Amino acid sequence: MTVKIFEERLTADKGIFYPVVPYDKEDKLLLMDFTDKNTDLTEDILANTNLFTQYINSKLKASGAKYGIGGYNEHRTIYSRSEIFGPHPNVSSGYESSKEEPRRLHLGIDIWGRPYTQVRTPLDAIVHSFAFNNRYGDYGATVILTHQLSGLTFYTLYGHLSLNSIKNLEEGQHIEKGDVFAEFGIPFENGQWPPHLHFQIILNMEGHEGDYPGVCKFSEREKYLNNCPDPDLILNMMKHVT
């Protein structure tokens, strides 16, 4: 299945998806920028999860937004905070401090909000897999669901959840459309990030279980975007950002 065919099918079915997070059209959404254009986000803030959380909360409060959102196909500087994404950039030259290319291109949409915000499945689903990816900067508690729609099989990934979200799950478990199955985690269980949901669509799991890259090398951008279409095809939230 090509990404074009998938996008056409989901576009044709727009409107059938249950909201992944509690959201009304009246709720304000703030577009979050985590590229190098955001000079407010200093290395000191990124190095301290409490300061990073305060930064997110202050932005949401100042704008009156319920959620901060965005990040698909965004080349982000924030991944320099964790070595799991590769070496730290050499700022003076614009190149990396080692020959290894780091991962910086984001493949999902992040929804930043209150801890323990409910997460629902947009369609009927089967639990594909789940895991506690407990490295600094990783997903933390993670769930991957399998969906069938218009003859297509695809997957959705939910990262940075609470540990309670995976406590009673079983692979193969059926979850009905609109059911609450997870919640935003807090730093000790979500990979040491401010509370948020990483939501990603995946066409081919390529043998992964309980995990799939949510960030790729820029040189692999085309490959990964062809396997991870725009999550807003399901969320349908980006048109409401300010």
Image (cartoon, rainbow, N blue to C red):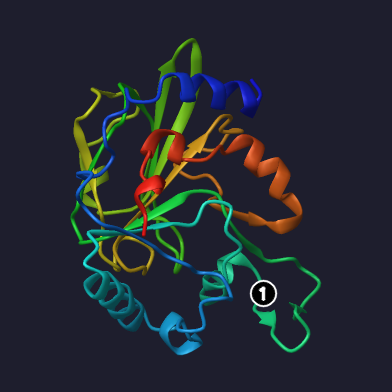
147 vs 224, left or right, is left
The residue depicted at 81 percent of the width and 72 percent of the height is 99
Q: Is residue 144 visible?
A: no
Which amino acid does the dot numbered 1 rest on? Answer: Pro
Seen in the picture, residue 13 relative to 92 is either above or below; the reply is above
Q: Position of residue 11 (x, y in %)?
A: 48, 25
The residue depicted at 36 percent of the width and 69 percent of the height is 192
Q: Is residue 20 visible?
A: yes
Seen in the picture, residue 137 relative to 15 is either above or below; the reply is below
The quarter of the picture where the N terminus appears is top right
50 vs 233, left or right, is left
- Residue 86's quadrant in the figure? bottom right
The quarter of the picture where the C terminus appears is bottom left
49 vs 78, left or right, is left
- Residue 20's quadrant in the figure? top left
- Residue 13's quadrant in the figure? top left
Q: Tally the numbered discs.
A: 1
Callout 1: helix, strand or loop? loop
Q: Position of residue 89 (x, y in %)?
A: 68, 79
Q: Position of residue 56 (x, y in %)?
A: 32, 73
99 vs 187, left or right, is right
Q: Position of residue 232 (x, y in %)?
A: 44, 40
Outermost right residue: 99
Q: Which residue is the site of mark 1?
A: 87
Seen in the picture, residue 163 relative to 21 is either above or below; the reply is below
